[in-house]
Amino acid sequence: MTLSRPHFLASAGLAGGVLLAGASVPALARAPLADAPTVGALRRKVGSIEVTALLDGYIDIKSELFIGLVDAEAGRLAEASFDKPGPRRTPVNAYLVNLGDRLVLIDAGMSDGRGPALGHLPAALQSAGVAPDQVDTLLITHMHPDHINGVLTSAGEALFPNAELVVTATDYAFWHDDANMNQAPDEAKPFFIGARRAAAAYADRLRQVDGEREAVGAIRTVPLPGHTPGHAGFIVESDGEALFIWGDVVHMATYQFARPDWSIAFDVDSKLAAETRKRTLDRVAADRMLIAGMHLPFPGFGHVARDGQAYRFVPAEWAYEL
């Protein structure tokens, strides 16, 4: 009998099955479960510029924090997104932009002051092959603690010894106004204190910008007021490509693409924040612009598509080539 290839494969499979059935094969992988996520750092190109998404950690946000939320609709949106009941886990992202001659970090996370869920930016930077002393510029979308506290060490000193700190003049003025702090509820006062401490640690290399203008190199500032008075995004442009890093335009992807009129309690001006969100979503959908957000599912890169009178988030595909 001539043994054909199909016969050979069938026989080999049968023999293998008999061998496995009659023999005890020792387990070779006996490693314990890691019980922790891997460090978050993911790189992609925008033209000739490298942008690395960095995960600082996460915050659990309750639906009660959203202004205007309708429970029945929120439940439907959560179910459609395969979300679990209860508080929704929201990432805290930052973005490292390599301009070739400068390393620019856009936002810096919370630091480790709020427990083990946050403060992983230094580890993410390390996994991306970058040390804090290599960062030249810190661009801050706004001076809330989950964006600026990470510029400090646990001892309250500057984590980035060679970097200038760039904030919007409007946000700086708001958080340094004693009248604003005195009028704020007690739970909001630490926001003012944290913003001032961060700015003070970089006082000799602090720069303020405002309006739509160049922030550094191929990165320009775009005012996005409402969440805070000086809240801003940054557009990175290179070789005909663009990435709009929009800060906190959206806090919860499950809700706010479908219902951009739902604001969050952390907004200083919730009405203006909703108007800014609608205008921004309309702009990036019309322009088919690549976006990234500090609270979009990590790594936060994607596009916005119109969905009737609303919008939907379309995560970007994996960047196979750099």
Image: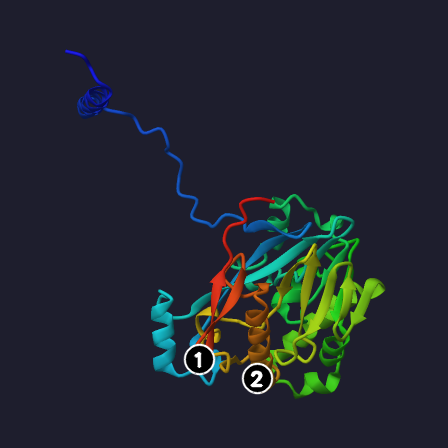
Residue 157 visible in this rendered orientation of the protein: no
* Residue linked to disc 2: 270
Residue 42 visible in this rendered orientation of the protein: yes
- Determine the image quadrant of residue 293: bottom right
Query: Looking at this view, is 155 or 172 the one in front?
Result: 172
Three-letter amino acid code of the residue under disc 1? Glu
- Determine the image quadrant of residue 201: bottom right
Q: Residues within 10 Å of mark 2 (few under 14, many from 20)?
A: many
Three-letter amino acid code of the residue under disc 2? Ser
Among numbered discs 2 and 1, the one appearing first in the sequence: 1
Q: Would residue 178 appear left or right of 300 to someone viewing this image?
A: right
Residue at 17%, 22% (x, y): give it. Answer: 18
Q: Would residue 275 appear left or right of 27 to someone viewing this image?
A: right
Q: Residues within 10 Å of mark 1 (few under 14, many from 20)?
A: few
Looking at the image, is mark 2 or mark 1 nearer the viewer?
A: 2
Residue at 64%, 75% (x, y): give it. Answer: 190
Query: Looking at this view, is 209 or 143 the one in front?
Result: 209
Above or below 34: residue 269: below
Q: Position of residue 6 (x, y in %)?
A: 22, 23
* Residue linked to disc 1: 64
Label 2 SS: helix
